[in-house]
Image (cartoon, coloured by chain):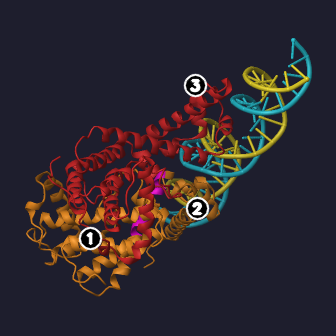
Chain colours: A orange, B red, C cyan, D yellow
DNA sequence: GAACTCTTGTAAACACCGTTCACTGAAACC
DNA sequence: GGTTTCAGTGAACGGTGTTTACAAGAGTTC
């Protein structure tokens, strides 16, 4: 187990502390408070020492994004594992978990999901959504959508997403045939992501055009509608 | 016209230049480049002089947000005035204009619509949307939604939005009866805002789970679906 | 026109920031 | 034991928001 040398262990430990301090600063005092000097102060070292671990402040922020994604994925998986119902229930659970996470971690959400930087890859995205989307589409419950519903101009992009989904699911050893993962279904997954993300972001940023005093039922209501539209919704009360 | 004294005119002029410089910096080099010293440098004055106009850097940023909202509203109104069709066409036009504006001004969009700061009031929001939403709801085209579709828990909040809409429309001298502006319709307007905002934000921030090479038809497709769901969509090609 | 106030700007300073560089001292290696 | 590797230091540079004391012009009053 302890193959690593003493120096390597110390380095790993310090790196862990750096990430931890950066995360705490982001959560407690916002993005602008995540400064090299503040992190160093927390660890009891000086700012230039951090350059032994990260090339720049920006690189450290990127690492922070990755950490956040990983943590979010873990949180979603955790909530998902508590849900033992059929696929529809699982989708609902993971959507609710996403909202809950975003509201509990607004700074992290803003950094990862609403910053005009490089688009994040599928892996960084937290594979939870893709995993579940794949399973959802694969399940025969969503069989009402055919390819010809989807405008031809979108085919090229949706095929790309199809590949992303196949790859995401195959990581866990599951195989999906292209006939099951058709474009009509994929299109509806994209539409669902639009609504889920839209609702959560509006709520986190307080950008509904009126004061919302009771946001949770509003979200659940949107979710019901979404699940109905996507093609399976046996009962609205989960 | 020139009631103002010479000093007042000079002050107004300087303030205008400050806003202009701040805006240019935001657009060209991002939020973090909007610095008091950079603005002052642009005007050929020193940074502390700016404190004669704004209490703090943060206050200046707030002003910047207001300016952006006003400009966006003007842009949307301009695009809207080019559309001479019925209400459905106007809604489509303003939604497209919103997307176009957001993509052309990503930094401004991020600042105004995706920052974890105080929620913006209805006026700051750019009254265009509310105006149009009011007109849309008032038109009998959207008559398919009844109040009992809407969960009771949401009534309180939707009534608040109802009031916001009535106020927004009445500013322009138009009166709407409560019977026409019913909760079912209002609910669908909120759902539409969720989808519109979600799609635009995902596109601006590059947060679709796959590379989108052809985003415009995807947006139009979403818009078609949205207009259909909201209850009026005579022909899909506008 | 002189004296006065109000306003707008300046310069200097403080504490903070990211980043670079020459350096130390200890761990790791041969 | 000598050498190399490397985490960490301290000083420095130019940048930031903000405060303070001060100057100089504009507007006002007598």
Badge 1: residue crowd in 10 Å (few <14, some 14–19, many ≥20):
many
Q: Is label 2 or label 1 in front?
A: 1
Q: Do the residues labelled 2 and 1 touch (CB within 8 Å)?
A: no
Q: Are marks 1 and 3 in contact (CB under 8 Å)?
A: no
Above/below status of A185 relative to C1: below
Q: Which chain carries label 3?
A: B
Left or right of B99 in this view: B11? right
The image quadrant of residue A87 is: bottom left
Q: Mark 3 sits on what residue? A: B1
Q: Is label 1 or label 3 in front?
A: 3
Magenta stretch holds residue B143: no
Q: Quadrant of the C terminus of chain A?
A: bottom left
Q: What stretch is highlighted in magenta?
A: A58-70
Q: Are marks 2 and 1 on the same chain?
A: yes
Above/below status of A35 relative to A93: above
Q: Mark 1 lies on which chain?
A: A
Q: Mark 1 sits on what residue? A: A226
Left or right of C27 in this view: B214? left
How far is mark 2 from mark 1, CA to CA? 35 Å
Left or right of A151 in this view: B174? right
Badge 3: residue crowd in 10 Å (few <14, some 14–19, many ≥20):
few
Q: Which residue sits at x=51%, y=45%?
A: B66
Looking at marks 2 and 1 on the same chain, the residue that comes earlier in the sequence is marked by: 2
Residue A22, position as x, y percentages in the image: 54, 62
Q: Mark 2 sits on what residue? A: A29
Residue A153, position as x, y percentages in the image: 13, 51
Left or right of B80 in this view: A2? right
Q: What secondary structure is found at the residue carrying circle 2? A: helix
Residue A123 appears in the rendering: no
Q: What secondary structure is found at the residue carrying circle 1? A: helix
Q: Which residue sits at x=36%, y=41%?
A: B77
């Amino acid at each position: 187990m302890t193959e690593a040398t003493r120096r390597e262990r110390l380095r790993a430990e310090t790196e862990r502390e750096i990430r931890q301090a950066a995360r705490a600063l982001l959560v407690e005092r916002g993005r602008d408070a995540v400064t090299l000097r503040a992190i160093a102060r927390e660890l009891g070292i000086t700012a230039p020492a951090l350059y032994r671990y990260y090339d720049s402040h920006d690189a450290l922020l990127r690492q922070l994004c990755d950490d956040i994604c990983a943590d979010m994925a873990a949180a979603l998986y955790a909530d998902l594992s508590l849900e033992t119902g059929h696929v529809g229930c699982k989708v609902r659970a993971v959507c609710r978990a996403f909202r809950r996470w975003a509201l509990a971690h607004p700074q992290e959400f803003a950094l990862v999901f609403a910053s005009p930087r490089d688009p994040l890859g599928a892996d960084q995205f937290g594979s939870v959504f893709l995993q579940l989307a794949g399973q959802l589409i694969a399940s025969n419950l969503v069989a009402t959508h055919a390819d010809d519903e989807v405008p031809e101009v979108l085919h090229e992009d949706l095929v790309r997403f199809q590949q992303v989904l196949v790859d995401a699911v195959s990581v866990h050893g599951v195989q999906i045939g292209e006939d099951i993962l058709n474009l009509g279904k994929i299109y509806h997954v994209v539409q669902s992501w639009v609504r889920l993300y839209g609702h959560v972001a509006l709520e986190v940023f307080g950008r509904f055009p009126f004061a919302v005093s009771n946001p949770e039922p509003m979200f659940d209501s949107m979710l019901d509608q979404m699940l109905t539209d996507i093609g399976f919704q046996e009962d609205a009360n989960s």
